[in-house]
Amino acid sequence: MKIICIARNYAAHAAELHHDTGLGTGTAPDGGRSEGPVFFLKPDTALLRNNDPFYIPSFSREVHYECELVVKINRLAKCIDRRFARRCYDEVGLGIDFTARDLQRDAIARGLPWEVCKGFDHSAALSPEFIPLADLGGDVQRLHFEMRLNGRVRQTGDTSQMLYTVDEIISHVSQYMTLRIGDLIYTGTPAGVGPVSEGDNLQASIEGRTLLDFDIR
């Protein structure tokens, strides 16, 4: 099972990431679309399930939350055309892509890979429940989700604002690696990311349904 994460898929977050880390937004005159979506992987040991607490790792002084819509692949897909990508999923959930931002800044500055800041244990919180897309209106590009930190809304996302649609992401990624049943695609985070501290509580909902609710320790 693969955890595939899409980077910089909301313009406002790409701008705040550039400001916070010095990482370029990667946008060309056409908005960067000619380059295709940027993606990276997390190992299955990164999963944090069942709304279990997230423990801040000792090696980072600045761990950030990034709330994302998660799509679960339901069939084998290799080099799939965008027209047929919709056949590859039928339910969605929510996730938190935890990022050791201080380690990310260092990796960027030294031109190193991101695994140390993105792929550490339990860095991919995943909602215990996935909702059939049909129960949410059937259109994956018309979904609203939000994340609350200690009861205050910090992130709001609308999938209509994605730079790359879910179908475009699936088509693109499948050109490079085979997608298998159970693979997870974290589709990118909207603006509003920030640090977590011991004692915090994170909640995330989609279309009014709370799927994530866990503590930071």
Image: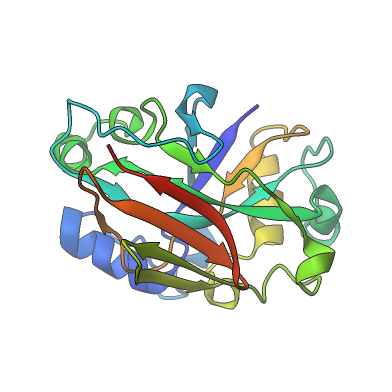
In this view, the residue in front, 126 or 141, is 126
Residue 90 against residue 191 in the figure, above or below: above
In this view, the residue in front, 97 or 176, is 97
Residue 165 vs residue 180: left or right? left
Q: Residue at x 81, y 48 (%)?
A: 88
Residue 38 appears anywhere in the view = no
Q: Position of residue 167 (x, y in %)?
A: 71, 59
Residue 3 appears anywhere in the view = yes
Q: Position of residue 40 (x, y in %)?
A: 47, 39
Instruction: Name the image quarter holding the C terminus.
Output: top left
Most distant residue in the top direction = 45
Q: Residue at x 47, y 62 (%)?
A: 9
Q: Position of residue 54 (x, y in %)?
A: 36, 36
Q: Residue at x 31, y 31 (%)?
A: 113
Q: Image quarter for residue 162?
A: bottom right
In this view, the residue in front, 55 or 76, is 55
Residue 216 against residue 26 in the figure, above or below: above
Q: Position of residue 17 (x, y in %)?
A: 26, 60
Residue 72 vs residue 34: left or right? right
Q: Image quarter for residue 24?
A: bottom left
Please count the marks in the image.
Answer: 0
Instruction: Name the image quarter holding the N terminus.
Output: top right
What kind of colouring is applied to the model shown? rainbow
Q: Image quarter for residue 44?
A: top right
Q: Residue at x 24, y 54 (%)?
A: 23
Residue 156 against residue 4 in the figure, above or below: below
